[in-house]
Amino acid sequence: MDKQQVFSHVDHTLLKAVSTWSQVEALCREAVDHGMATVCIPPSFVKRACEAFPALKVCTVIGFPLGYSTMAVKLYEAQQALQEGAAEIDMVVNLGDVKAGNFDAVTEEIAALKAAAGQKVLKVIVETCYLTEQEKVALCHCVTKGGADYIKTSTGFGTGGATLDDVKLFANHIGPKVKIKASGGIRTREDLEAFLAAGADRLGASGALQAYAEKG
């Protein structure tokens, strides 16, 4: 897989709390220049990024990074982001509901966000570092039943990021219309290519350009 093929699967990401517009603008320019799938940026920059780079798909995060906002708040966040031009939404599930085994509530929330997103892409961040294997499998079913487009491994702000084993587990339990996004700790060329080979369709990464620059 060549560099350009990999970049076409990358959500070029900047989600640090101290991110500035000049940094986001540079990220967007890099994404356009290198044919990235999207930029994944904080909600506060969505409108400006969409106006400045109309040909670029902009992704943003909802209920991020902890996931315990109420469903009404997540819906409002998503609706505002979509109105401002976001093409893709990455939402964090309510991990309290997950740990309580309240998977019907998790599915309901996913379905509500997908209804708001409509034809736009919804990715569901399940934060694998906090989950048992049984919970991961249950969340594959929630994401599928809720109609989301992707299941996503991690926020990058938890105690761990994406693993190849989790991507392979998801691939065995998601529905046929659900894709996989791996994110968190994906930093090297080998990582990027390995996660795609394992079954991920999208990669959340901030260092894809550096990963390839290091090896030419």
Image: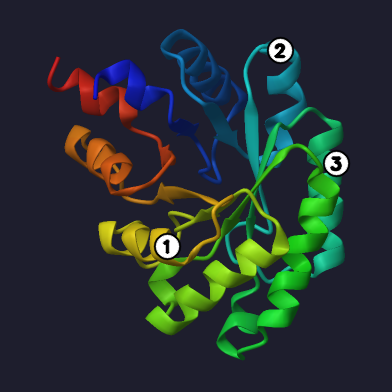
User: Which quarter of the figure has residue 18?
Assistant: top right
Q: Residues within 10 Å of mark 3 (few under 14, many from 20)?
A: some
Which badge, 2 or 1, comes first in the chain's sequence?
A: 2
Q: Secondary structure at mark 2?
A: loop
Image x and y of residue 74, in percent: 78, 58
The residue tagged 3 is 80
Q: Is residue 213 above or below residue 179?
A: above
In the rendered image, the quadrant that contains the N terminus is top left
Q: Report, in whole angstroms, how far the alpha carbon at label 2 lies from the one at label 1.
A: 33 Å
Amino acid at the residue labelled 3: Gln
Q: Nearer the viewer, residue 98 or 168?
A: 168
Q: Going by the image, does 187 lie left or right of 62?
A: left
Amino acid at the residue labelled 2: Pro
Camera sees residue 132: no
Which badge, 3 or 1, comes first in the chain's sequence?
A: 3
User: Which quarter of the figure has residue 147?
Assistant: bottom right
Q: Going by the image, does 172 lie left or right of 175?
A: left
The residue tagged 2 is 54
The residue tagged 1 is 170
Q: Residue at x 15, y 22 (%)?
A: 214
Which badge, 2 or 3, comes first in the chain's sequence?
A: 2
Q: Report, in whole angstroms, how far the alpha carbon at label 3 lies from the one at label 1.
A: 30 Å
Image x and y of residue 105, in percent: 74, 79
Q: Is residue 106 above or below residue 59?
A: below
